Amino acid sequence: MPAPMYGADDPRRCSGNSVSEVLDKFRKNYDLIMSLPQETKAERDFRNSIWLAERNEKELIRQTSIRPFRKATYTKFIEIDPRLRNYRSRYGMISNN
């Protein structure tokens, strides 16, 4: 005789509902969903814009936590010593750095 499947007797997986009970629950939930008023396009756009703004805010917070803003300690180029500006490199050429 084959063994039952693993977890078949687990009460968390056994619904204990008959077909009629499941259909009654489905009808009740379906009627509840269908009784809700229809959402207008303006309301849907408003809800989507709020969702998008919250998502962008969360993304900015996430990006900041990954790469925090760092300000440069200097904003000008470092001055080169005039003695090192012109020097002779290989084959006698003048090299400017």
Image (tube, rainbow, N blue to C red):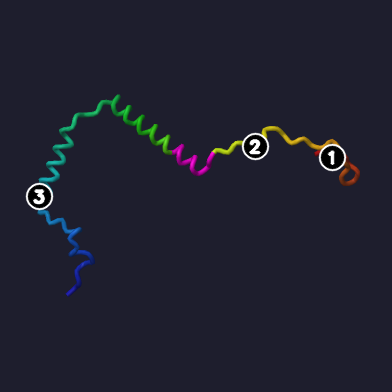
Which of marks 3 and 2 precedes in the sequence? 3
Q: Quadrant of residue 86?
A: top right
Could you tell me the amino acid type at mark 3?
Glu
Task: Point out the tag, 1 or 2, that comes first from the N-terminus.
Answer: 2
Say which residue appears at 87% left-offset and 46% top-offset: 90
For the magenta stretch, what is the residue range?
59-68
Question: Measured from the top left, where is residue 24 in percent x and y?
Answer: 10, 45
| Few, some or many residues within 10 Å of mark 1 (<14, 14–19, 20+) | few
Q: Circle 3 is placed at which residue position?
A: 21
The image quarter in which residue 10 lies: bottom left
Classed neighbour count for the residue bearing mark 2: other residues with Cα under 10 Å, few (<14), some (14–19), many (≥20): few
The residue that disc 2 covers is 73
Q: Residues within 10 Å of mark 3 (few under 14, many from 20)?
A: few
The amino acid sitting under disc 1 is Leu
Is 40 on the left-hand or right-hand side of 85?
left
Question: Is disc 2 placed on a helix, strand or loop?
Answer: loop
The reply to whether callout 2 and callout 3 are in contact (CB within 8 Å) is no
Residue mark closest to the camera, 1 vs 2: 2
Residue 81, image x and y in percent?
82, 37
